Image (cartoon, coloured by chain):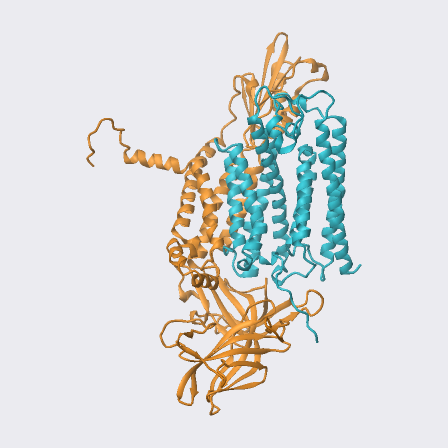
Amino acid sequence: MTHDQFEVLSNQAVAACAVVYFLAVLSNFAAWAAGHKVEEPVGEPVAVGGAAAVGAPAQAQAAPDVVDEPERMQLFARIGVALTVVAAFFHFIALVSRGLASDPVRVPWGNMYEFTLTGTWVVVMGFLLLYRRYSLAWLAPVVTSFVLVTLMVDVLGLYTPVVPLRDALQSPWLVIHVVAAITATGAFTLGGMCSALFLVKERWLRRQSADTPPSRGYLARLPELAVLDRVAYRTHAFGFPIWTFAALIAGPIWAHYAWGRYWGWDPKEVWAFITWVVYAAYLHARATSGWKGRSAAIVALVGLATLWFNFVGINFFFGSGSQHSYAAPEPTAILRTID
Amino acid sequence: MPRPASGYEAPPLRPRELARWTWRQLTSMRTALILLFMLALAAIPGSVVPQEAVDSLRASRWRDAHPQLTPVYEKLGLFSVYNSVWFSAIYILLMISLVGCIIPRLLVYWRGVRRLPPDAPRHLSRLPQSRTFETDEAPDVALERARALLRKRRFRISTNDGSIGAERGYLREAGNLLFHLSVLIVLVGFALGGLWGFKGGVIVVAKDSFANTLSQYDDFRAGALFDAASLSPFEFTVNDFAVTFIREGREAGMAHEFGADLTYRSSPTAAQRHQKISVNHPLTLDGTDVFLISHGYAPHITVRNADGSVAFSGPVVFLPEDSTFRSFGVVKVPDAQQKTGNTQLGLEGEFYPTYGFVKGKNGGPFSAFPDAKNPAVSMLVWKGDLGLDGGKPQSVYGLQKKGLDPVRKADGKQVRLDLGMGSTAKLPDGLGTVTFDGLSRYVKLQVSHTPGQKIALGGVVLALIGLLGSLFIRPRRIWVRTRREGGATVVEVAGLDRSSGGDLSAEIDSLTDALRPAPVSKAAGSTTAGESS
């Protein structure tokens, strides 16, 4: 196959995986809806999602048997996971062919479109790998819809045709630094989802009173707060050392060779440092009385915000001022020579 | 100091108590957390406002564009955030807090690591994880089996009357302490580089040489304790600079590979050597690195007076403005002549490696390709006083137009020279001629010496090792107690997870299953007291 054919294949694989992710989202939502409609009479029709906080409530924690899963729900959840696996496979093909589409063949991490494509894949793989270990079925709707939306934004807003790597990027450290950074980003993203769910559920539990009827909604079926907190902590704890390596070891070593200084307070470096400090604060907050639980989860989300801002915002707002700006879409078109 | 005698008065804090109170506040986790947030917040302005130390050109442009904000920002140290008093104050306080937190913990750890696990608490069933079952074994037999099992699982064990305590995961705290101490090491390494290091930029036109002395640098930044005498006495010549641009396909115009071929000596008496340097491949000479940062064009311009004598001749460095290498530059001719006598000439304009021109209102000259396929310069001419004699330093890349007047043609328009390579243009008023003779490439090099790099790197690596230990080693205590009750032996197993994210239930379950003699006793009550939270 030629390089151009690989590029077409990559684009088609992205489209295919997006369709399958969409089906996975539908299936996951169906599972969640099926969980709602159990045969036994339920007090009042229960609102879905964020609105559940208003009228739904239940003593889900006190009576775990409320969370009995009807067969249909389990079936849809299983279909959802199977579809996610298929989509992740297409997603992987999109990545590999993207690398093969370039001449010379290279790793598919040359611009933001490719970073996002890889980052979302890492999120999905992280989710699938931890699925059994932490029984993550409850996270499926969030992960699949997040990945679907992010991929849509990526294709619509960030798409860039395949071009070879710039000189500064031609280094083995590209592979080491970027793999670590993307892996950590994926882990932090998963952890952030758990922390967000923790906050939503915590608020929902706080708001319900004793006489509110039991709920079978999504929030009621989420694991108890301690479990959410623990899964969030473990994914963050996995991501943090990798981030340390990516931002504070591999990055500086590469920066030394490419730019002649190991740490130069480039905007991207500043924000990588800020992210590191905020996640360090999260790990400390979790062990400090008065900060455990809610505050720690908020800190984790602040960390995620700085991470994503660094990933997206720096390239757009500080493009010209950052040495990392090659990650942004190239604004200047280059005219062809006629000779 | 005398105090006014008034009603109730809190007992005054004596200096010692005040110091102790301050110290305790400073070293509390809460303060450390707040300082961490402050550090994160304080780092933000440095990414928004151009930093003097990062990009002095952008910083000075920003200053010119914001004359009112500049004095305020300067007072606040916003152009060098990371050296500012307030930024330093935050991280120094954070380090003090860290030391104050770590030293007592080192002592506690030193004592704790040699101690045996504590005795079993009275009510094991109140622990986050506990199981109870009955067996027919004698109490000490069951206890001995538990002991052997836990020993096999590499627990440290203390035996008491009727119960055992077991603990493992002591290295977590060691990792934690190592991590925090390593942060100090990194800071030391960073400080060494900041105080004794230097970073200099120099533009060298191909075929020219560079000797490592202060006067040769275009810009130079050094730490407070840097000594110019410590510059290592190397010198090099840029023999050649080669760059290939991709010419076809949608990658057209990208530099494919570029590198400079250097001949260098590590000291004036050393042997000559050759090395090619390129991006990601610097030249290292006893601790000082020479990096290739970027490249550009230096057209050779010759200015002749009306009588044919040369007023200026040589390559002039033009700075690239975009990826087509449309470049901006100026020529300063301090010793030009006109009919009435001596004057100074200034040329200011652009260089186009592959000249193109678009007619029309929004048209004008442009560069079609970054390679020098059809090089041309287009410059406006000024005459008068260049402002070089005032003793005030000025940029070589810009004209100070205060003392300059445009040189005008007969029709009153300012003279614009559009020169292809090899061509000459005549200036009005007997000012002579300007020739674009030839073209050289130049390289922008960065020479830097950063002591303490290895210390900082070693520090981060140690910090990472410590971090892994402190995150993934799970310290936990398990207790087993046996007692005879109503003809059977009651075995209680309980555990306490001492890490922050652990879940001991699986481990306690497997231990209980291993201790339980046979499935017969399944009927015996087994209780779970919920999970730790």
Q: How many marks?
A: 0
**Residue B171 in sight from this viewpoint:** no
> What is the display colour for chain A?
cyan
Question: Where, by quadrant of the figure, is residue B10 drawn?
Answer: top left
Task: Between residue B124 and residue B373, name the one nearer to us.
Answer: B373
Task: Between residue B211 and residue A24, name the one nearer to us.
Answer: A24
In the rendered image, the vertical position of residue A40 relative to residue B25, given as above or below:
above
In the rendered image, the vertical position of residue A169 relative to residue A57, given as above or below:
below
Q: Residue at x 53, y 45 (%)?
A: A276
Percent position of residue B162, x then y: 56, 16
What chain is colored orange? B
Percent position of residue B163, x then y: 56, 18
Which quadrant would the C terminus of chain B be assigned to in this image? Answer: top right
Which quadrant would the N terminus of chain B be assigned to in this image? Answer: top left
Task: Between residue B496 and residue A84, name the one nearer to us.
Answer: A84
**Residue B417 in sight from this viewpoint:** yes
Q: Residue at x 76, y 42 (%)?
A: A86
Q: Residue at x 47, y 92 (%)?
A: B307
Percent position of residue B86, x then y: 39, 49
Of all residues shown, which one is farthest toward the bottom?
Answer: B307
Q: Is residue B18 left or right of residue B455?
A: left
Q: Is residue B362 left or right of residue A78?
A: left
Q: Residue at x 67, y 22 (%)?
A: A66
Q: Is residue A312 left or right of residue B305?
A: right
